[in-house]
Amino acid sequence: MNYIDYILIAVYLIGFLGIGFLFKENKTSKDYFLGGRSTSWLPLSLSTMATQLSAISFISAPAFVGLREGGGMQWLTYEFGVPLAMAFLLIAILPSLYKSGIVSVYEYLERRFDPSSRLLISFVFQISRSVATGVMVYTMALILQATIGLEFWISVLVIGVITLIYSFQGGMKAVIWGDVIQMSILFLGIVICLIYGISELGGFENFLTHVDKDRITAIDFNKWGFNNADKNDEFGFWPMVIGGVFLYASYYGTDQTQSQRLLSSKNMNSLKKLLFANGLLRFPVTLTYCIMGLVLGTLVLQDASFNEMIDSVYQTNIGSLEGKRADLMVPVFIMKYLPNGVIGLLIIAIMSAAMSSLSSTVNSLSAVTMEDFVKRFKPELSDKTYVSYSRFLSVFWGLVCLFFAFFAGNIEGTVIEVINKISSVFYGPILAVFMLAILTKKTNAIGANIGIVAGVLFNMYLWLYVPEVFWFWWNAIGCLVTVVTAIVVSSLITKKSSEGLEVTFYTGKKEVLILIGFFIAIVVFCLQLPSFFK
């Protein structure tokens, strides 16, 4: 890196301070946490995707596709459930949540059941999301330290302080428009790596000649995910589709980091377009960075010096990056093959991945704490006081995330592997509770609470004692166990349910049929993928 790269990084960071100042006028809770419900569907779509296109997507996913043992284009199967989940949310879940006017998505559960359901899920969200975000910042800071020599603590503080300042000032509007910029930079970085990687290989034809053909297959119908004790039964078609529908329906519809974007839509038409866009645009973006991973992985095999440089960086930092050799592929490529100026832009892309996830988490955690806990004890807060409290809570949760980042070295070896499993333990049961709240009338609070406990405990039992079941299945199994238990308990223990909640369904067919057709199209495309590399 030289002065050009450092100037670009400095301009980027200063610019984000300006974003917070630009959107500092926030007068109510709807302003600070929902952007006044005035943002159109396109920036909200890009913001939602930016949270997804995080460090995992930019660094770990290409590494999995191109270099990691047992990896390959099967990463694409993660996307199969997305369009179907968007169709389900569009029809059955989000219209009711949106029209209720809530800020915290968990408030709906209190209105339908009682405070215990709301507070339990809210508490779980706060702990799990802050830990996961801290680990993500930790990992990015380690990679920046290993590749460009930036001290770990400086990386954490730069990412954290800049993000906290613009999140503190601008609230959701600053987060959304910051995400739009970061999404653009991230995707530009992926395309740049792809173009330079093909160039270093001597052209696209040479890439097709030397690519590892074992990494091209995306779909395996023979893997069912029920014989996974040795991890050789993962990424089968059926667990990724069925489990993926439940996972993404819960993530987008009931996880505050994502549902808060959806609740920020200016109207139902904007919400429809937002869901539609996410259902259609995620796969092309994922396909792009997966191909980038194939290209860079092929370059590692063809250029011994590239492989040696990855080994050198890994051996130097093995104490902190143990087990993460493949994750160095993208950052080492940036430092080895790209010219100055472009290096700075790609380092910005890595920082953007961390800042986007952190800003989204901070704003969502602040919203949940404010709505689910503070307002419970101080319901008569003025708008001015509400916004002030919200800003300081965003700082508090930002510091909590950075705390986990600084101390994640002691737990990183387990948390990185476990964090997705933790989510899958809870996602299915949480989705089930929202489905019961919206789609049933006779389910009561006792049934819902016992149901979610049963679903979570059953998933934990599978985790601890039935390793043969692939964790993607937990999302569907936990949901089913919760629904059945809640209905049975509600029928045995009668208790009056809350009345007066408006239930709204989307009755349009065009978007739903397109999303289902798109699911079929991407499956057919993935089946034909090996023929494209002949």
Image (cartoon, rainbow, N blue to C red):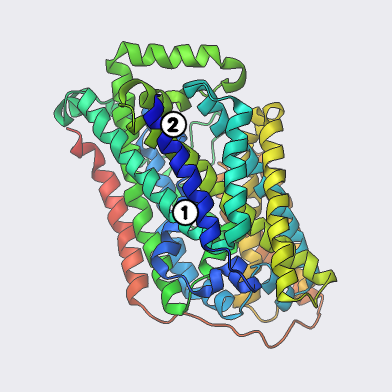
Judge left or right: residue 418 versus residue 43: right
Point out residue 287 in the picture as x, y percentages from the top left corner.
32, 44
Q: Residue at x 55, y 41 (%)?
A: 470
- Foreground pick, 152 / 484: 152
Say if 53 sits above or below 83 in the image.
above
Q: Residues within 10 Å of mark 2 (few under 14, many from 20)?
A: some
Q: Which mark is residue 16?
A: none
Distance (Cα) linking label 1 and label 2: 22 Å
Point out residue 448 in the picture as x, y percentages from the top left corner.
73, 68
Say if 225 sits above or below 141 in the image.
below
Q: Which residue is mark 1?
A: 179
Q: Mark 1 or mark 2, which is nearer to you?
A: 2
Judge left or right: residue 118 versus residue 322: right
Residues tagged 1 and 2 counted as in contact (Cβ below 8 A): no
Quadrant of residue 159 within the rendered picture: top right
- Foreground pick, 16 / 91: 16
Q: Quadrant of the N terminus?
A: top left
Q: Earlier in the sequence, mark 1 or mark 2?
A: 2
Judge left or right: residue 408 versus residue 8: right
Residue 391 visible somewhere in the drawing: yes
Residue 465 visible somewhere in the drawing: no
User: Looking at the picture, which amino acid does disc 2 mark?
Assistant: Tyr
User: Looking at the picture, which amino acid does disc 1 mark?
Assistant: Asp
Q: Which residue is mark 2?
A: 6
